[in-house]
Image: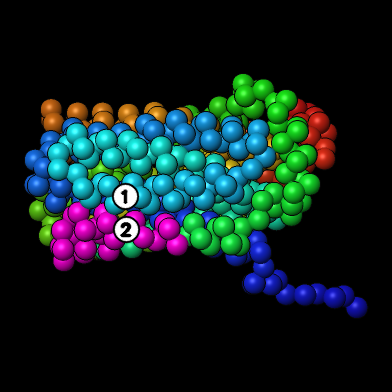
Amino acid sequence: MTDARPPRLFTYENALVAILAVTFGIVFMDRLAVNYLAPFIVRDLRLSATQVGLTSSALAITWALTNIGAGRLSDVMGRRKPLLIAAVIVFSCCSFVSGLATSFAVLIGARLFMGLAEGPVPPMVLTLMAESSSRHRIGLNTGLIINGGISLFSAVLGPIVIIGLAQAFNWRAAFWIAAAPGLIMAVLIARFVREGGAGGPDKTRDARAAAAGDSFLGVIAHRNIVLCTLLACFTLATLMIGSAFTTLYLVDTRHIPPTQASLLLSAQGVAQMMSFVVAALSDRIGRKPAVVAFSLIGLCSPLGLLYFHGPLWGLALLMVLGGLAQGVTAVLFVAIPSETIPLRQLGTASGFIPGVGELVGSVGGPAIAGWAADRTSLEAPFMIMAGCSLAAGLLALGLKETLGVRPDDPAQPLAAEARLAA
C-alpha cells in the first residue's frame, strides 16, 4: 500500500515564487512605464524618437552594471535578502522622481539613477528562487517569476493602468502612483523570505566560503554561459525595442486609437505572462529545443506589425505568438546556468547574463532602433527586431543540453563539474 499524497499548494516554495514574481513584475512595470507613457511625454517635453530610445537605454546602462556587480557581490557575501530589500525601496522612490521631470535631461537623469537601484533585483530574486526550488520545477518556477510576474504587471496591467492614469490625471501622476506597490513588497520580503533556501544560515555560510575562492572568469567561461549571454543580447533587444516603439508605431503610423492600442499591447502581455509554459516545457523536452523553437516564433510579432493589415484580432494573434517567445529568458537566465554551474556561483551568472544582455541588447537596441527610425521611418525598429529573433534561433543551435544535470552545491561541486565535463 503506497502513501500517495497530493502536492500541497501552501508551501514556502510556492509562497516564495508568488512574492518574488510580484516584486519582479512591479520592478519592470516601473521600468517600462516611460515607454507606455511615451505619447504623452513626447508631446509635453517635445522629444524625438532618438530621445525616446535613449530614455529606455539610459536606465538599461546602470541596470546592467549593477546587475553584474550585485550578482557577484551576493555570491561573495552569501547574502541576497538585504540587497533585495534595499534595492526595492530605492527604486520605488526613483519612480516618484521620474514624474518630476521637466526636461529630457532631468528625465534621463532620473532613469539612470533608477537603473542603479533596480539592477540588483534580478540576480537577487533569481538566486533566492533557485536556492529554494525543487529540482524538477526549476524551469517552471523561473518562468512564473520572469515571464508570469513581469508580464502580468508590466505588460498586461501596465499598459491599461499606466495609460489609464495618464488619461485620467497626467503622465506625472502615473509615475507617482506606480511607486507605491514596491514599498509594500519590500515589507513582505523582509517578513517572509528566508536566506539560503532549505539549508538556511549554515548553507549560506558554506556557500560564502566556497564562492570566495571562485574565479569570476571561471564562472562565466563555460560554453553555455557564453551562449546564454549572447542569446540574452538578442532576446532583450527584441523585448526593449518592441516596448519602446510599439505604442508609437500603432498610434502614430498605423493610426490606431490609444485605447485599442493599449488592448493590443495587453493581449501581447497576456501571452508574455503565459510564456512561463516555455520554461515549464523545457523541464520536459529539454532546454535547447525550447529555446530554438520559441526564438523563431518571436518573428511573428515584428513581421505582423509590419506586413499584416487585416482585422485587429488577426494582428493581436500575431502579437500573442510573438509574446510567447519571451519565455526563453527564464531558460537562459536561470534554468541552463543552474544546470551548468554550482548554485553558489549562480548569483554571478544570473547577474552577468542579463547584465551583458542589458548593456548590448537593452541599451544598444532601442538607441540604434531610434536612430534608424529618425533617418528612415518607424518601421525600422521592427525590422531590427525580426533580425534579432532570427539570430537568436540560429545561435541557440549551439547550446549544450543540460536537462537533468544540476550541479550539487555546495556539497559535491567537483563531482557535478566532472559529470558536466564528461
Point out the tag, 2 or 1, that comes first from the N-terminus. 1
Give residue 178's mark.
2
Disc 2 secondary structure class: helix
- At horizontal 60% and vertical 45% (from top left) the residue drawn is 80
Percent x, y for residue 214? 70, 26
* Residue 227 in which image quadrant: top right
* Residue 295 in which image quadrant: top left
Q: Identify the residue position indicated by label 1 in the image.
A: 95
Percent x, y for residue 121? 49, 45
Q: For residue 173: magenta?
A: yes
* Residue 8 in which image quadrant: bottom right
Q: Nearer the viewer, residue 280 or 211?
A: 211
- At horizontal 73% and vertical 75% (from top left) the residue drawn is 6
Asked whether the beta carbons under mark 2 and mark 1 sit within 8 Å of each other, the answer is yes
- At horizontal 83% and vertical 34% (from top left) the residue drawn is 415
Tell me the distance, in whole angstroms, between the alpha carbons under discs 2 and 1: 7 Å
- Chief SS of the magenta region: helix
Give residue 190's mark.
none
Q: Nearer the viewer, residue 32 or 206?
A: 206
The local crowd at label 1, few if under 14, some if 14 to 19, many if 20 or more residues have their Cα within 10 Å, is many
Q: Is residue 404 visible?
A: yes
Q: Quadrant of the N terminus?
A: bottom right
Percent x, y for residue 207? 73, 38
| Up/down of 311 relative to 342, above or below | below
Q: Amino acid at mark 1?
A: Ser
| Up/down of 230 relative to 188, above or below | above
Percent x, y for residue 305? 23, 48
Disc 1 secondary structure class: helix
Q: Which range of residues does the magenta coloring cover?
A: 161-184
